[in-house]
């Protein structure tokens, strides 16, 4: 049977992620790294180590300026698992293409799966098994696509990681952004390798749903309205034609998208103040329920000993409130750089109001 190479990629707190938006929130700052390691060991690491199917490689992208103390710690944490690698971020590399992954890809690989898992999130322990069962099943039936997006369904839980007397392990709540499904955690791209030269970085998870809907209704009118998506599809088509694939580069809803329909919990997204998506921690406060160690995360590998040891630092103190307000100022106009000065001020003000309201409902 043809070989499938599966690589899970974790972006471990490197500067390239926030090159234009960090505004003083340096991910290599000691306090930020210490906090990030705690979350990594609590969720992401056990999620990887306890996958039922271990036939995958794990590549962690780090900053080239990560201090040796922290790099050695990271190397030690992953050293017990075979096929786990640290890769230094290089701004000249095109992460959306497969060239930078070549050192990790078996020479006999006929297909490549790249999967995203952030360093503070967790996947259910059957994730890689579900992925491999799906694609090896397609291989056996001779129905393997050249290009397919994959994601988890809406069984996503948010973990608001802050302490209160009512919830000493924090709170859980359902995913509150249906237009952002599938979640970033577990978002994958399957391609014929080396003919189709793309990784999941090429198309963000938040475009999965709209792209699938667009392909299913690709009228001339829709083409005019969705120039960005049409350009993406043309790029895929050209890539296939240039490599002379036995495929015309056309995507279809049936063959180009797959949702893992596991009925149980699939993803845990940890909300905390040092996340670029920190605003999620203030959303849907009325939907929160306290975390129960025995029942809140079925099928997930969570290090609750570390959770108990670290969460008290995330209680509502004056320092926490000040940090939350600064985060609002730092990131409130992210992705809106074309806004005028007064528009940015109004947007910052609205976010500050929402943040203050959210803090009031903590605990």
Image (cartoon, helix red, strand yellow):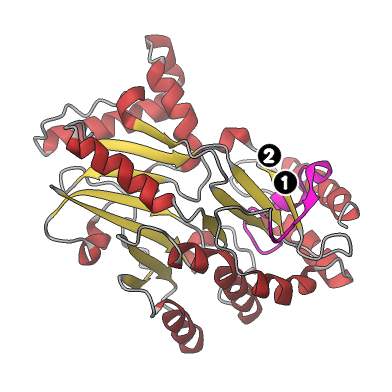
Instruction: Write down the region rendered in magenta.
Output: 273-294
Q: Which residue is mark 1?
A: 173
Mark 2: secondary structure: loop
Left or right, 199 with respect to 359, comes to left
The residue shown at (29%, 55%) is: 6
Q: Is residue 13 visible?
A: no
Q: Position of residue 270 (x, y in %)?
A: 64, 57
Is label 2 in contact with label 1 (beta carbons under 8 Å)?
yes
The residue shown at (77%, 69%) is: 314
| Front label number (2 vs 1) | 1
The residue shown at (84%, 42%) is: 286
Local crowd at mark 1 within 10 Å, few (<14), some, or many (≥20)? many
Q: Position of residue 342 (x, y in %)?
A: 76, 42
Quarter residue 315 falls in: bottom right
Measured along the vertical axis of the image, is residue 319 above or below residue 298?
Answer: below
Mark 1: secondary structure: strand
Specify the label residue 176 is tagged with.
2
Q: Is residue 86 visible?
A: yes
Measured along the vertical axis of the image, is residue 13 above or below residue 75?
Answer: above
């Amino acid at each position: 049977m043809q070989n499938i190479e599966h690589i899970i990629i974790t972006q471990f707190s490197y500067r390239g992620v926030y090159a234009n938006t960090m505004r003083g929130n340096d991910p290599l700052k000691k306090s930020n790294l210490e906090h990030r390691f705690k979350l990594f060991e609590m969720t992401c690491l056990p999620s990887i180590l306890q996958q039922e199917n271990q036939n995958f490689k794990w590549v962690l992208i780090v900053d080239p300026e990560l201090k040796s103390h922290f790099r050695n710690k990271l190397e030690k944490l992953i050293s017990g698992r075979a096929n786990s690698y640290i890769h230094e971020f290089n701004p000249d590399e095109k992460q959306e293409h497969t060239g930078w992954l070549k050192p990790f890809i078996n020479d006999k690989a006929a297909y490549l799966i790249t999967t995203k898992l952030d360093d503070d999130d967790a996947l259910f322990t059957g994730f890689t098994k579900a992925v491999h069962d799906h694609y090896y099943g397609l291989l056996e039936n001779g129905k393997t696509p050249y290009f397919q997006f994959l994601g988890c369904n809406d069984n996503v839980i948010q973990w608001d990681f802050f302490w209160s007397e009512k919830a000493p392990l924090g709170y859980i709540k359902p995913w509150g952004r249906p237009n952002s499904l599938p979640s970033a955690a577990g978002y994958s791209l399957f391609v014929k390798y080396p003919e189709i030269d793309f990784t999941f970085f090429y198309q963000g998870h938040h475009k999965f749903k709209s792209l699938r809907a667009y392909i299913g209704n690709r009228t001339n009118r829709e083409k005019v309205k969705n120039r960005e998506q049409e350009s993406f599809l043309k790029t895929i088509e050209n890539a296939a034609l240039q490599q002379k694939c036995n495929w015309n580069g056309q995507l279809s809803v049936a063959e180009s998208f797959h949702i893992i329909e596991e009925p149980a919990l699939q993803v845990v997204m940890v909300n905390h103040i040092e996340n670029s998506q920190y605003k999620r921690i203030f959303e849907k406060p009325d939907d929160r329920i306290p975390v129960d160690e025995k029942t809140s995360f079925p099928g997930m590998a969570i290090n609750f000993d570390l959770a108990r040891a670290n969460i008290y630092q995330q209680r509502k103190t004056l320092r926490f409130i000040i940090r939350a307000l600064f985060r609002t100022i730092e990131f409130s106009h992210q992705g809106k750089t074309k806004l005028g000065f007064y528009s940015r001020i109004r947007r910052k003000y609205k976010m500050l109001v929402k943040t203050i309201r959210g803090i009031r409902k903590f605990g």
